[in-house]
Amino acid sequence: MKTDKGCIGCQECNKKAPLFASLTEEELQVLNKDRYSVRFNKNEVILKQGTKANYLVSIIHGFAKMYIEGDHGRNLVLDFVNPPRVLGGPGAQVEGRHKYSVLAIRETLVCFIDLDRFKQVFASSPAFAEQFLIHCSGNYLAALDRLVGISQKQMHGRMADALIYLSEEVYNSMVIGEDISRQDIAEYTSMSKDSAIRVLKEFERDQIIDLQGRRIRIVKSAKLHEIADKG
């Protein structure tokens, strides 16, 4: 982990992050005060569950995962994070503590935005406030869908959901990269690692996927969707 001097400022990120597109130059300058950027190496913790939340986190470059640290070392992966993405959540607003951890899956550039500065801009810009609420609502609805899938679907349905999401939303490719480990997939689908590996091998046996080392190539996307729909 090291402080990064290559981050120009919020005005530059405004050109990349849709969430900040409605902000004026003056409002961006407010956000830019007291903010700092840090480059995290692979497997370094960006946010730690339970720590004090003084900043919102904006993922600028790289790739990370959000997860809840459970008892006895069992974690639940909430999401895989591609930039641009702003993380904060209800914990920062309600309890003042982070309710989840964030880990860099590969080298990741992160900007820490002072929470008080963010609240100042939120109060002054109705358009930005609306966009942020839409952003949070989308995350909330996605979390509800995940909860339904984990609680109601069998292991094959949960695995199909995960592979579809990783392929179509995270990687935008028929190949899921080696950044995602089997342990990550197990924690995302709420399975043991052994169970996740077994289901993946069954999918490969049925020629639905092709396991290429740590990479996973989707062979029959329509069949995956069918399994996901049946649960």
Image (cartoon, grey):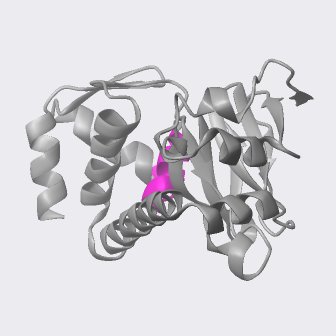
Task: Residue 46: give x, y in percent of width and height.
Answer: 77, 45
The main secondary structure of the magenta stretch is helix
Is there any visible trace of residue 105 in the rendered image? Answer: no
Q: In this view, does 127 lie above or below 13?
A: below
Task: Residue 194: give x, y in percent of width and height.
Answer: 49, 50
Q: In this view, does 13 lie above or below 88?
A: above
Q: Which residue is drawn at 81% across and 34% down?
A: 37
Q: Which quadrant holds the C terminus?
A: bottom left
- Residue 193 on the magenta span: yes
Q: Residue at x 32, y 34 (%)?
A: 167
Task: Residue 30: give x, y in percent of width and height.
Answer: 76, 48
Please state the extent of the stretch shown in magenta in the rendering: 182-194
Q: In this view, does 155 lie to the left or right of 70?
A: left
Total numbered badges shown on the rendered structure: 0
Q: Residue at x 8, y 39 (%)?
A: 222
* Depth order, front residue of 180/64: 64
Task: Residue 101: give x, y in percent of width and height.
Answer: 71, 57
- Residue 171 on the magenta span: no
Task: Quadrant for residue 45, please give it.
Answer: top right
Q: Which quadrant holds the N terminus?
A: top right
Q: Is residue 79 above or below residue 125?
A: above
Q: Is residue 63 above or below residue 134?
A: above
